[in-house]
Amino acid sequence: MTEATTAAIPEIVNLDELEQRAKEQLDQASYDFVAGGAGSELTLRANREAFQKITIMPRVLTGIQKVDTSTDLFGQQLSMPIYVTPMANHGVVHPLAEVGSALGAMKAGALFVAPTGSNKTMEEVATAIKESPRWFQLYFNKDPEVNKQLLQRAERVGYSAIVLTVDLPVLGIRDRNVRNSFTLTKGLHRPNFQSEQFMAATRGLQSLTASIKNDLSWDDYEWTREHTPLPVLIKGILSPSDAEEAAKRKVPGIIISNHGGRQLDTGLGAIEALRPIVDRVKGRTRILFDSGIRRGTDVFKALALGAEAVGIGRPVLWGLALYGVDGVTAVLKHLQLELVNVMRLAGVTRVADITSEYIEKHN
Ligand SMILES: Cc1cc2nc3c(=O)[nH]c(=O)nc-3n(C[C@H](O)[C@H](O)[C@H](O)COP(=O)(O)O)c2cc1C
């Protein structure tokens, strides 16, 4: 696994099998860091199981031949309604780290969301993908000056939206990382933080968390909005009441997510949270979704339930780990291909036409 990884990519059968391939290649601690969830991993499993309870109702004799997965998100034209969700520490699985994943997303025509806790600077990521759509995820720092600087830098180098993650007041207890005494190695650090002292202090997982304001409130959301002209989305909403508050405050977009089951254990499968929130706030704020998407059918279901786009996490890192930039592109294109297949079989031409009419059962 070097920067020169150029091996031809064997066909991806499905993203679960890709995970198995990555598991064979990665060391245990790195694989566990990515794959793992919090506690007994009940939420992690629920994220997948919940999709099975939702069934698709196809229409036939529609005369449809071609389908189009392109979509418009906050004025940006994307080839698919699937984006790379923010994940810290891509460098754990590949030396190109976030730059590799961003390039892979660009080649697939997909949006890339760069994390605060990246192993490459946000400038390096932005420079690598110049004209390609990109957002920046903010972990709200205890030090307002750090937040100001991060927001200014994000705007300066062309990130077009901020994603404020709100479901990490403390780090979920992830047994696998405890078992493996996981820490960042391979010379990895978090160069978005500029002071040397701070970089040293953010090598471990807990220390990054220690820098995050642990009593985040709506005031901090408002503060963020006041300090950037960019739209500020909120990531990590599950409760319809929180979604309602966001809509009241005219938050431009919310991301329904349980952090891929890495934070609160014994929560609901994230997709189960979507419908009640859509019922409450649809049309008053934009709704995105992540956590547990592995199939084109999952993408279809989330869109049908009212999400405008879906984020995909771990499979991107499996693609990066195995095949570098091209692996990330292959993962996104594979999911797009599966989505095309579902749209054909369900009888839908355009992303905007994927509505709840195509869902038979839901919570
Ligand atoms: C290795 C890893 C690191 C993550 N780091 C962050 C992060 O820094 N900020 C954040 O908002 N979410 C983070 N997440 C959560 C993802 O954005 C997303 O919610 C989750 O991975 C989606 O679930 P999926 O992996 O099942 O697709 C991380 C997830 C993983 C797997």
Image: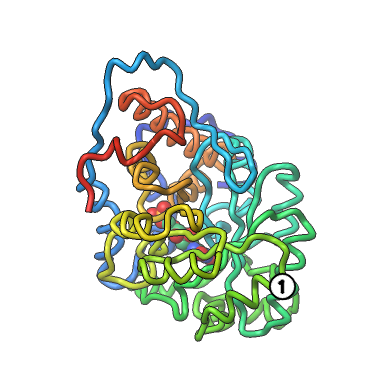
Q: Residues within 10 Å of mark 1 (few under 14, many from 20)?
A: few
Q: Is residue 53 above or below residue 86?
A: above
Q: Which residue is mark 1?
A: 227
Q: Find residue 187 and report its image quarter.
A: bottom right
Q: How is the image coloured?
A: rainbow
Name the secondary structure under disc 1: loop
User: In the drawing, does residue 86 fall left or right of residue 149?
Assistant: left
Q: Nearer the viewer, residue 53 or 95?
A: 53
Residue in view at x 36 percent, y 39 percent: 355
Q: Is residue 28 visible?
A: no
Q: Is residue 24 above or below residue 36?
A: above
Residue type of the residue flagged with mark 1: His
Where does residue 222 sit, x and y in percent of width and height?
61, 76
Residue in view at x 50 percent, y 54 percent: 286
Residue in view at x 59 percent, y 49 percent: 112
Quadrant assignment for the C terminus? bottom left
Q: How many marks?
A: 1
Where does residue 35 sit, x and y in percent of width and height?
38, 58
Q: Nearer the viewer, residue 191 or 42?
A: 42
Q: Is residue 356 visible?
A: yes
User: In the drawing, does residue 6 fall left or right of residue 65?
Assistant: right
Where does residue 95 sit, x and y in percent of width and height?
61, 53
Residue in view at x 53 percent, y 78 percent: 218
Q: Nearer the viewer, residue 187 or 326?
A: 326
Q: Is residue 350 above or below residue 303?
A: above
Check mark 1 vs ligand 1: CB closer than 8 Å? yes or no: no
